[in-house]
Each structure stands twice: as structure tokens, then as C-alpha cells.
Image (cartoon, rainbow, N blue to C red):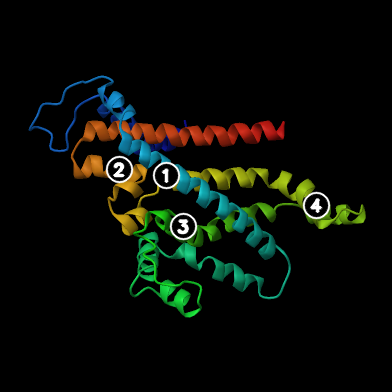
Amino acid sequence: MLLLPALAVVGFVAIYPLGKTIYYSFTNQEFLAGIEPTKWVGLRNYRELWHDSIFRTAIWTTIKFTLITVGFEFVLGMIIALVVNSNFRGRGAMRAVMLVPWAIPTVVAAQMWKWMFDDVYGVINDAGVRLHLLSHSRAWISEPGTALASVCAVDIWKTTPFVALLLLAGLQVIPRDLYEAASVDGASKLQQFWRITLPLLRPAILVTLIFRTLDALRVFDVFYVFFGNRPDTQTMAIYDQATIVGDGHVGYGSAVSVAIFLIIGLFVVIYVTFMRVTEE
């Protein structure tokens, strides 16, 4: 009985909108409802979505972005967390400073980096040419070969501190007695990391990977600031927004939303299953 108010709030803000989205995905609902009567079309939207080459490109772009950013952020975040978890003078100040990129709003950070990547006035090209790292200025955002790498670099720079913070929280609950006992038994630092740190850090790693994967798979803001609705760099969220808001096709856009929900759910199931098998 005491849980009912909380469950009612969750149902209102999460389950009800999800149910409406699923319902709309089986209709031809338009943004300006009333001009054309809404009809039940069954699986038509999903059949069209199955053959939608633009959405397949958006899926592949989003998955590549997710794999690159989550992988780099996890490795860099783990290194930072291990460093910050050790005892040294100024550790508190370093913890505060490392959170500055994460504290900057994503749209602000994306626009800042977009100016830095500019091929005419950007500081990155200027520094690269002055240091003879680049032979000439490059249009990092416009060139297909560097566009995805540019946006990945921004996300890695911004979100690595968040990953480090989550992993640091997991490191701090590991008893120090285990490391002292391992040192007495002659275990090296690398052996302690593989035998003590990683196994006991598994719950924090699972939470971190799920959080970051969910964020990466529904990424919108940084891509939209960098590229707008450019077809070759659309993510799933941008394509969904363009379908519903730009084109007004609420029914088809709802089917896209359901597909995104299922793709994200699949990643979560893979993570949870893999971690459970590893524990067993």
C-alpha cells in the first residue's frame, strides 16, 4: 500500500506515454490531427520501417557512436578512477576539477567544440598547422571521414568524468584489507587488479555501462548541434524527431520510437546476461 503512490507516479510519467506511443505506432496519426481522420493501419508502419534505408543508416551510425564512446569512456574512466582513488596530495581538488567537462551543458559544450573544429577560424586547425601536425586546415565536421570521430571526441571528453565518478564510487566500497592481505601473499598490483578490483567492481561496471549505453543510443543534442538533419550523420533520435516534428508523421514516428526502445532494451539484456554468466 505504501508503494502505490510511487507506482502511480511511475505509471503516469513512464508507462502511460509508452502505451500511447505503442498505440499510435499502429495508426496513421498525423501531427495536425483532425485534417485527416486517424485510422488503424496494423503493422503497416513497421513494414515500412523494416525497408527504411535511412533508418538503417541511423541505427548503424548510432551503434558505431555507442561502441566507440562507451569503450573509450570506460577505459579512460577506469584509469582516472584508479588514479583518483589512490592517496596523494590534492586528491580532493582533482576530483572537483575532473567534473568540470561533465558539468557543462551538452549543447554549450557541443557548440564550443563546433567552433574549435571550424576549418577557417578553429583553434584545433590553427594549433595543428602551427605545430606542423597538419599540412593544411581540415573541415573536421563536414568531411565524412572525420565527422563521426569529431562528435565522438566531444562526447568522450565530456562524459568520461561521469564514468570515472561512477567507477570511483564502486572502488571506494572495496575493503582495503583485501589489498593488504594480497600484498602480504605476494600478489602484484596487476594481479590485485584482476583478482580483487575487477570482480568486486562488477556491479558498478554494469551500472556504468547501462547508463552510458542508454545515453549513447538515444543521443540527440551533440549530433544536432554539429550536423542538424544531415542524412549521413543522423542518429535514431534525430531521425525520430524529424519524422514526428518535422514531417508530422506521428504514427510512423511512434513506430520508430518503439524500434529504438527495443534496440536499447536488447543492449540492456545483453549486458545483464553477460554479467550474470560471468558471475556464475
**Residue holding disc 4:** 192
Discs 4, 3 touching: Cβ within 8 Å? no
**Where 123 sits versus 157, above or below?**
below
**Residue holding disc 2:** 239
Q: CA distance from mark 2 to mark 3?
A: 20 Å
- Percent position (x, y) of residue 176? 79, 56
Residue at image position (36%, 40%) is 57
Q: Amino acid at mark 3?
A: Asp
| Quadrant housing residue 123 | bottom left
Q: Earlier in the sequence, mark 2 or mark 1?
A: 1
Q: How many marks?
A: 4
Q: Amino acid at mark 1?
A: Thr
Q: CA distance from mark 3 to mark 1?
A: 13 Å
**Where 28 sits versus 249, above or below?**
above
- Percent position (x, y) of residue 43? 28, 20
| Circle 3 SS class | helix
Q: Earlier in the sequence, mark 4 or mark 3?
A: 3
Q: Earlier in the sequence, mark 3 or mark 1?
A: 1
Q: CA distance from mark 2 to mark 4?
A: 46 Å
Q: CA distance from mark 2 to mark 1?
A: 11 Å
**Where 52 sits versus 235, above or below?**
above
